[in-house]
Amino acid sequence: MASAVSSSTTKAHGYAPVNGLKMYYETEGTGDPLVCIPPAFGYAGLNRYPALIESHTVITVDLQGHGRTADIPERPLSIERYAEDLASLLKYLGIAKANFFGESYGGNAVVMIAARYPELVGRVATYAATFGPPQVALNPKTTHFAEPPTAESSYIQFQRESYKKVAPDPEYWPRIFDKLGNLHWQGFSKEELASIQAPVLIALGDFDFVRLEHAVETVNLMPNAELAVIPDAGHFALFSEPQRVIPVVKHFLEKPAKRIPVSTAATGYHPDETR
């Protein structure tokens, strides 16, 4: 592991032996651990959130075949396996419990951790995640292709060029593109979502790849879930306009566990008694 320390924050990076992988991770900041999972083809360092680093030790992970973590060709990709790998990484790092923040299918993965490894989870924040099969979760207006996508399609140019900057084998791109395309995520059962006791934030843009109705339905299934809709925002708002999303995530992660009740029509608003 290599590290550098300044007067205000600590930065480190390393590779962890996780279930046959050499999983790359970076840490930055001080405070309680916050594990950040990037979206498809994302990796540690592609996005950085200074507002979260101010008050958390942010641990960002390159999942199997992403960024600096080399793929194992014969090892399938799945949201369930990502959760298993992340649980093993926490054990390797000696972290008994953490908060989680996942973007897109990174959000799927952190909710899977909450479902399968609840003892590891404090709070879970997601942006643009899906919780059911594509026909239920995705908005056809924003996910329609004029032509079947390929590894060289222009719509994936940002991810392709970013991948090739850091991947151990940049020429592996077409293989990991196809492999990820064959990850057929079918979501959670209603029973799984209802079993999650951790506080969960489901955030998305109002012009996301994800149907707003799907997010609302999911929030209603989870006992401690909250919904945040970012106006005039799409699936990639954390890249294009993070300043509109991160304050919502930060508030969710850092607000007190016990709060004064929300006012209703019956109670009315009373300073310091309702909000």
Image: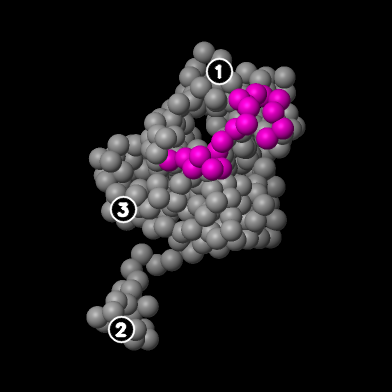
Q: Observer-nearest residue: 223 or 10? A: 223
Q: Secondary structure at mark 1?
A: loop
Residue 186 at x, y = what percent?
Answer: 39, 31
Residue 31 at x, y = what percent?
Answer: 52, 57
Residue under the image location 58 percent in, 50 percent down: 234
Residue 42 at x, y = what percent?
Answer: 62, 37
Q: Observer-nearest residue: 142 or 49? A: 142
Q: Which residue is labeled 3 in the image?
A: 220
Identify the colour scheme used. Answer: one colour
Label placed on residue 182: none
Q: Secondary structure at mark 2?
A: loop
Q: Which residue is labeled 1 in the image?
A: 72
- The answer to whether 117 is drawn above or below residue 201 in the figure is above
Residue under the image location 29 percent in, 49 percent down: 221
Q: Which residues are the magenta region?
A: 137-155
Quadrant of residue 66 within the rendered picture: top right
